[in-house]
Image (spheres, rainbow, N blue to C red):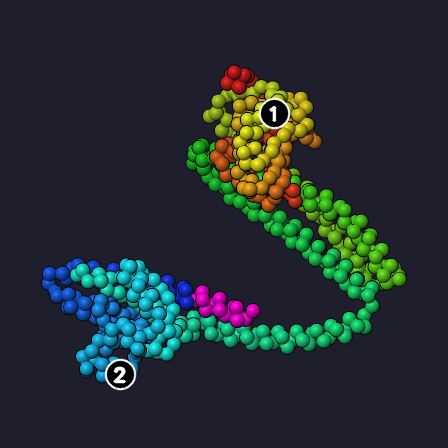
Amino acid sequence: LVFNYESALRGGTSAAFAKTQLEIARALARGGEEFARAAIGTLSAQSIESEIRSRFVAPVRLLGGGAWLYSQGGFDCARDALLTWCPGEEPEAGKAEGRGVVYGDEDASPGMERILAAVSAGREGTGVFFSRRANMQEVVAWTPLSVAGTPMVVGVSTGLPNILEASGVVRQSRNAMVMVGLMTVGGLGLIIVSAKNIVRRRQAEIELEQANAELEDRVARRTEELQAQTKALMESRMRERLREKEAEIAFQAGLVESAGTYLHTTGNALTALEGLFLKMRRTLEAMAGADGAFVAARAALAEALGREDSPAVQSLNELESALLGRAVPRLAETLTEMAELKTRMIAELEGRRGLFDPRRPARRFAQAVDMGELLRELAQEARGELTGEGLGIEVQDAIRLEARVARRKVAYGLGRCLDMIQEAARPGHDGAIRLSAGRSEDGGIRVLLRAEGAAFVGADPCRDDPQLLTFINYLNENHGLFGIVHDAGGFSVEVELGNAPADEEDPAATS
C-alpha cells in the first residue's frame, strides 16, 4: 500500500511538474520566435541564435536544472551544459578541441530518440529520461522553435530527485513508512490482546457486542441524516430571510418587476421546503417501527444473558428512552413548528402578492378538467418516444376526478414533468412510469407520476427547466404543491392542484 501510494505520488508530481515545464518551454519558444522575427534582416541567424540563448534560455534555472536550446545538426555542451543528453564531464576540454557533440555519441542519454522523433514531426512533449550528466532521472519538456527558417528545439530539464525533495514527496513517503511501521506494531499488540479476550469471553457476549454495534451504527446514521436535513432547513430559512429583505428593498424603490421575480422564487423555495417536510415525515414514520426492534433486541439480550436486569439491558432501555421518548417527539414538534412557520410565510406571500395583483390581468381563466382523461392523453402522446428508449408508461386509478384549473397550463406542466422524468432515466436500462390521480388529505387533487425500475434507481431529476419553473409558479399562485420524493425503487413526482378562481372560461382551453 505504501509503495503504491509513493508511486502514485511520484507519478502525479512528475506529471504536474512536466506540464509546468512545458508551459515554460512554450513561453520561451514564443519569446524566441518573436525576437527572431523582429531581428531578421539586422542580425545573422547565428547571432539570433546566440541572442536567444543569452536572453531567453540562459536566465531560466529551476531546482538545479534549467532551459536548453538544440539546433539542427548538433550542439555544443560547453555552451549549453543543461542539454538533456550532454555527458556533463570535461565540457571545457570538448570546447577546446572545437567539437560539438552529435546525437549518437556513446555518452548521449538513452531515450533521446523519442525527443528527436517528436521534434522531427513538429510535436512538443514531456518525458522522464535518465541523464548521464547528473547520473539521475530528469523530467524533460520540449517544444519546437523556428529561427529564420531553421528548426530548433527549446526544452526545460529538472532532476526528478530535486523535484521530489522540493515538493515534499520524499518527506511524505518517509512519514508514511514510519506511520505504517507504528500501525503494524500497534496492530500486532491489539491482535494479541483481542485474541486473549475472545478466548475468555462467552459466545453470548460476542453476539451482544455485535448487536449493540449494529444498533449504534444504525442510530448514528439516522441521526446524521436528521442533522443534515435540519441544517438544510435552517439554511433554507436564512436564504428566505435574505430574499425577503431584497424584495422589501425592491418594493420600496418601486421595482415592481423585481418584486414579482422574488414572489416566484419564494414560491419555488416553499415548494422545495414542502418536499423536505414530506421526507422528514416519512423518516419519522419509519422511526415508529423502531419499538419492535428494541423489544426484539431486549428479548435477545435477556435470553443470551439469562436475566433481564443486566447492565446491557438497562443501557438498551436508556437508549430507547432517549431516542423514542425524547429525540423523536422533539423532532416531530420541531417539524410541526416549521410547518406552521411555512404557513405563515405563505400567508405573508399572499399578502404581498395582493400589492402587485393590480398590475396583472384582472381575470383568470379556468375550467373543470377530468384529470383521468388528461393523464390518458399525456400517456398516449408520450408512449411512442418512451417505448423507443425501453421505458413503459401506464395510467392507474384513472377515476373521474374534476379539478377547476387552467387546462392548457396544467396539461403543459404535466408534460414537462414527464420530459423531466424521461431525461433523468439512465440509458440502456428498463423502467416504467405510472400515472395516477386521487384526492389528498385536505380534499385537493393529487397527481402522482411514479418512476421505478433500473433506469430510475439513483436518478436525480433536474427541475431547472424554465417552463417547469413556470408551472411550479402557477401551482404556488393557486395554492398547489410540487415535490420530488426518492426511494429505493426510484422516485415520485407529486403535484397537488388547487382550484383556481372561475371568473371566466379559458377560450383557448375549451377550443
Rounded to the nearest whole Å, what is the CA distance between mark 1 and mark 2?
Answer: 90 Å
Q: Which residue is rendered at x = 81% and y = 62% of the image?
A: 312
- Mark sitting earlier along the chain (1/2): 2
Q: Which residue is mark 2?
A: 90
- From the viewer's perspective, is residue 334 above or below residue 309? above
Stretch of the chain drawn in magenta: 1-13
Q: Is residue 52 visible?
A: yes
Return the x and y of residue 281 as percentages of the image width and height: 68, 42
Q: Nearer the viewer, residue 286 or 227?
A: 286
Q: Position of residue 262 (x, y in %)?
A: 49, 36
Relative placement, left or right, of 285 versus 142 is: right
- Amino acid type for the residue under numbered disc 1: Arg
Q: Residue 461 at x, y = what percent?
A: 55, 40
Q: Which residue is mark 1?
A: 376
Determine which quarter of the picture holds residue 240. top right
User: To which quarter of the image does residue 400 belong?
Assistant: top right
